[in-house]
Amino acid sequence: MKALVAVKRVVDFNVKVRVNADGSGVDIGNVKMSMNPFDEIAVEEAVRLKEAGKINEVVAVSLGEKKCEDTLRTALAMGADRAIHVETDASLEPLAVAKLLKKIVDKEQPSLVLLGKQAIDDDANQTAQMLAALMNAPQGTFASKVALSADEAVVTRDIDGGVETVALKLPAVISADLRLNEPRFVKLPALMQAKKKTIEKQSVEELAVNIEPRLHVKHYAEPKARQAGVKVASVAELVEKLAAAKAI
């Protein structure tokens, strides 16, 4: 059984991003980049399933510029067996990502596709759902627990009212939530070994996917600074201030 895990290179979650002065985009020059945290959880889950004997092979795939190789090396160091890089400098929207991943899925024929539930840069939370639709496969989103058998995945997922358990016939698409696991710390020897591994290259042209954007961003702007709060001496004063602010 094979698992395919999609990983994205994003600005590290500890970095406070800034908007360019001209509003043309987010300034990511000379900032730390890393694997999307939700994707890291997805890789960890795939590796754990492999260590438990449920999966034979873990294949990591990333879409984007050449520097995405670093993200794939991290996945290899965590325990992925192979890596595929679809290299492109274009900005990819979720639908384009899903279509490219569908081509990789058609080639690799995995029993399980794992992704993070969303990327922390665009927060779209769309790719897993779109990929499942393109594959005509069952999906388990916001997974907090995964139990895998020969032909079925039982997924416990977080919903607004609590948790829900669904049984998915394989092949299936699962998106990882924070509660699924805690990724392992990657040691330096594993990183050094990962640097020696070959990353398979694919191009958008070879996959024959139209990645033209459907959305056009006109301007980026930072949110306005919040005004400082004030302390009130009584409930009556609180009500008065809320009424003045038309909050009640």
Image (spheres, rainbow, N blue to C red):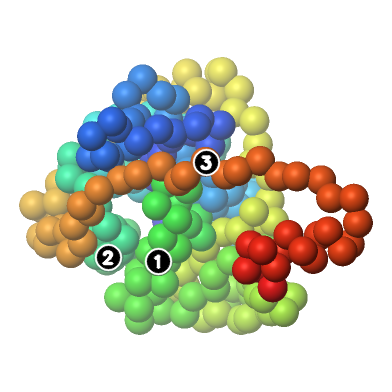
Q: Are marks 2 and 1 in contact (CB under 8 Å)?
A: yes
- The residue lying at 32 percent from left, 24 percent from top is 29
Amino acid type indicated by mark 1: Gln
Classify mark 3: helix, strand or loop.
Answer: loop
Quadrant position of residue 109 = bottom left
Give the x, y percent position of residue 53.
63, 55
Query: Can residue 82 be seen by looking at this rendering?
Result: no
Foreground label between 3 and 2: 3
Q: Residues within 10 Å of mark 1 (few under 14, many from 20)?
A: some
> Which mark, by number, is residue 126?
1
Residue topped by disc 2: 95
Q: Residues within 10 Å of mark 3 (few under 14, many from 20)?
A: few
- The residue lying at 71 percent from left, 64 percent from top is 242
- The residue lying at 23 percent from left, 34 percent from top is 22
Quadrant position of residue 133 = bottom left
Residue topped by disc 3: 225
Give the x, y percent position of residue 116.
50, 55
Q: Are marks 3 and 1 in contact (CB under 8 Å)?
A: no
Between 11 and 68, the one nearer to me in the picture: 11
Position of residue 96 relative to residue 229, above or below, is below
